[in-house]
Amino acid sequence: MITFYRYTTLAFFIFLYFSGFSQELEPRALTNIPTGMNFMVAGYGYANGNILFDPALPIDNARADLHTFVAGYLRSINFFGLAGKLDIIVPYGIGDWNGLYAGVDTSVYRSGFGDMRIRLSFNFLGAPALKPGEFRDYKPEKIFDSRRSYWMFDRFDSRSQQNGHSVLSGAR
């Protein structure tokens, strides 16, 4: 009986250890692309609205207007024979917050760069690093081709199908 409790406790702590890690899923993050290709990415986000604080704090009617700009560079690489990508992402944010602090009208403006991210990713199963000519002629020997079909189950499901040179994707 003591052995059962030891194994149960060990399994519980292993679960706690690994549940602290997470991942980010981005559209087409695992798509295999030919080595040596470069991509530039730019994005913009806007958010505004009320901010709710603990009622014990002397802050009332707090509101924020936030603008976020993102620039990034991606290079596809050969990572020890596997398809890989190296990303560099730089965010820039502008924010204007206002509200009542202890009954006094107060506002704050901040702008600046966020934390730069450098990410190395690679597909370690079924994704050999191929040059553009090899990539075009690549025919995997497996029945399931991850470049043409994928399934993902989260709060929605999606499906992708390649028709000639175009890809049709849908989600619900």
Image: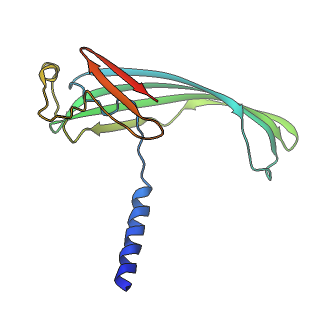
39 relative to 31, above or below: above
154 relative to 2, above or below: above
Q: Nearer the viewer, residue 157 or 14?
A: 157
Colour mode of the rendering? rainbow
Q: Residue at x 46, y 36 (%)?
A: 156
Q: Residue at x 15, y 27 (%)?
A: 130
171 relative to 55, above or below: above
Q: Most extreme residue toward the right, as rendered?
A: 103
Residue 165 screen position, x and y as percent: 25, 14
Q: Nearer the viewer, residue 85 or 157?
A: 157
In this image, 16 relative to 76: left or right? right
Residue 119 screen position, x and y as percent: 35, 37
In this image, 136 relative to 108: left or right? left
In this image, 137 relative to 5: left or right? left
Rendered image quadrant of residue 67: top right
Residue 30 screen position, x and y as percent: 30, 34
Q: Would residue 65 be visible to someone looking at this image?
A: no
Q: Most extreme residue toward the bottom, as rendered?
A: 1
Q: Residue at x 17, y 20 (%)?
A: 132
Count of marks placed on residues: 0
Residue 79 screen position, x and y as percent: 20, 37
Q: Would residue 84 be visible to someone looking at this image?
A: yes
Q: Nearer the viewer, residue 170 or 63?
A: 170
Q: Quadrant of the N terminus?
A: bottom left
Rendered image quadrant of residue 83: top left
